Amino acid sequence: MDGARVVLKQQLTILLLLSITACSPSEVGAEKFENYLQRLSRVADVEIESTEATHRAKIPNFSPSRTDNIPNGTLSLIDFLSLSGCALQTNIARRNTSMGRTASASQKLILDLEFLRLAPACIELLTRQGDAEIAQTLHDNIAMRRTHLKQRLFTALLGGPEWQDFWRIPNRLLDYPDNASGDAAQALWILSQRVERFLDGQWTEKDEDLEPLLAQLRVSSGGQLIEAARLQTEALTRGSAVMALAAKRGAYCHRGSITDVGTVTKTVIAKYFAGDVQVWSARVSQRHYEIQTPLLALETRLEDVLPHEYVVWRQHREALLEQLYAAPRQHVLSAQALLNDC
């Protein structure tokens, strides 16, 4: 009786494991690479070499310290009372509430942008009324906010929690890039255009509505791209290592002619690399293009306020993303050298 219970328990365990496996979403990219590597390995009778995992640099978090270093202006309560009739008065009132003083970096940026947009009309009104002193105070505050605008933009956009989420490395890629959010790439494009207008002093009230755009970045689109680049680089490095070892053993060439193993390997490369892996890789590269164009535009406009830690992280990020194009090319060149030069 006990033996029957044990057998039944084992059967139930197996069924449970099978159901979990059946319900688990597949890792499309990883499975494509693994299928290709296994076929290369079996044909050449060479074990797949393991490779050291690529270092994943985590984007540094700058928000609290950077925000504290940006001055908020010198407008007093008396100045505020003098602005009767100016739309700017509401802006200053919001800034001086407890919520305004503890506002997030993005909210402080929005307040500064609104101040810069509304202040000129208020200065014109004050000048007509003969209140030169408060008009000069507003002039000084405009100059101060323009001086620190790039820093505000960096702190709110590239130093904020939304940017951290955008570059967060996911635990799994699943069916990436089919599951990638097009909204995030579009939001990044719109943000890059707005930053250009902010720095050129040519924006409208509508442009100041930044929170919805930032919210669309919280989907790890950048992190997915980095993980896809890492997956491809490590898999193709292993594939090239398998072929190099097989060639060293004479598996592909014999007495100046290609062997049967070499011929079958060419078929494997054509069918499972060019016909499958590279199709996935091309779609990932398209995703990279969609993100990279507005990303570079955004970072270039803020180049002179990027902290050293951010620059180091960006260099690591770009080196890894460059492998989206370099790794397949290097793998093809390696295969051609080993199989075509018998």
Image: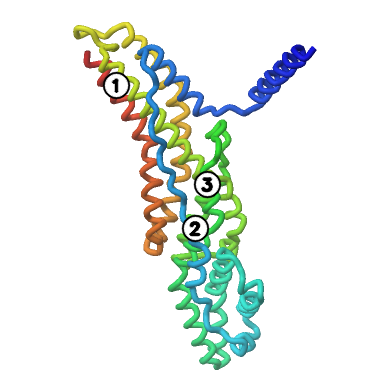
- Mark sitting earlier along the chain (1/3): 3
Image vertical order of residue 194 relative to residue 149, above or below: above
Q: Residue at x 63, y 28 (%)?
A: 24
Please provide percent x and percent y for residue 194: 50, 59
Residue with the mark numbered 2: 61
Image vertical order of residue 176 relative to residue 200, above or below: above
Question: What amino acid is found at the position of numbered circle 1 in the picture?
Answer: Ala
Q: Residue at x 55, y 65 (%)?
A: 105
Assign a secondary structure to mark 1. Answer: helix
Residue 244: mark in rendering: 1
Please provide percent x and percent y for residue 39: 43, 15
> Outermost residue, front direction?
2
| Image-based side of 279 in relation to 79, left or right | left
> Looking at the image, can residue 285 be seen?
no
Residue with the mark numbered 3: 168
> Outermost residue, right direction?
1
> Looking at the image, can residue 173 be seen?
yes
Residue 80: mark in rendering: none
- Mark sitting earlier along the chain (1/2): 2
Question: What amino acid is found at the position of numbered circle 3 in the picture?
Answer: Arg
Q: Residue at x 61, y 68 (%)?
A: 103
Please provide percent x and percent y for residue 338: 26, 19
Circles 1 and 3: CB atoms closer than 8 Å: no
Please provide percent x and percent y for residue 75: 56, 84
